[in-house]
Amino acid sequence: QLQLVESGGALVQVGGSLTLSCVASGESLGDRTVAWFRQAPGKEREGIASITASGSSATDLDSAEDRFIIYRKNADNMVYLQMSSLRAEDTTVYYCAVSTGSSFRMAEEKYDGWGQGTQVTVSS
């Protein structure tokens, strides 16, 4: 069974950068689309960006446009979220998730494998 583990979350100052990592084990990511989400306590989960196995990526969160980049290394079963110009409102838990399919921009309900999350705290 495929398992996802995120890492890289940290305390960083406003304007700083972080790269989150997500490693898959148990199974290969194969041709499945993978995404990053985030969810703050008491708030709805937000889709940030997704990427297909071929590398086609989409940013779904307006505030992440031009600041966050998703990429993956299929040979290593890894997915990354490179974040820059971090803001206080980016503070929350970040999750990677793998979908059941391989299409570009899979619907959120199609993501059936989730990591445990990694905390990002942006301080001013």
Image (cartoon, grey):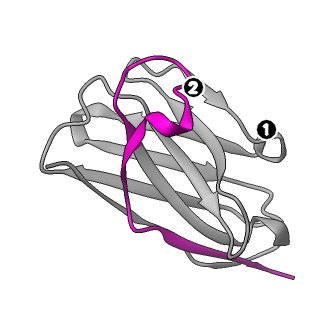
The quarter of the displayed image where residue 79 is located: top left
Which residue corresponds to mark 2? Answer: 57
Is 113 covered by the magenta stretch?
A: yes
The quarter of the picture where the C terminus appears is bottom right
Please name the amino acid that badge 2 sits on.
Ser
Viewer-nearest residue: 124 or 1: 1
| Residue 33 visible in rendering | yes
x, y percent for residue 121: 68, 78
Name the residue at 50% across, 38% down: 109
Name the residue at 75% across, 42% down: 61
Which residue corresponds to mark 1? Answer: 65
Query: Which portion, as a residue range, is magenta?
Result: 98-124
Please name the amino acid that badge 1 sits on.
Glu
**Left or right of 120, for residue 24:** left
The numbered disc on residue 116 is: none
x, y percent for residue 88: 83, 72
Viewer-nearest residue: 49 or 87: 49
**Left or right of 95, for residue 11:** right
| Residue 15 visible in rendering | no
x, y percent for residue 26: 12, 50
Name the residue at 83% across, 68% down: 89
Estimate the spatial distance between the alpha carbons at disc 1 and disc 2, rounded to whole Å. 12 Å
Secondary-structure class at tag 1: loop
Viewer-nearest residue: 24 or 111: 111
Name the residue at 38% across, 20% down: 102
Identify whether 98 is placed above or below 42. Answer: above
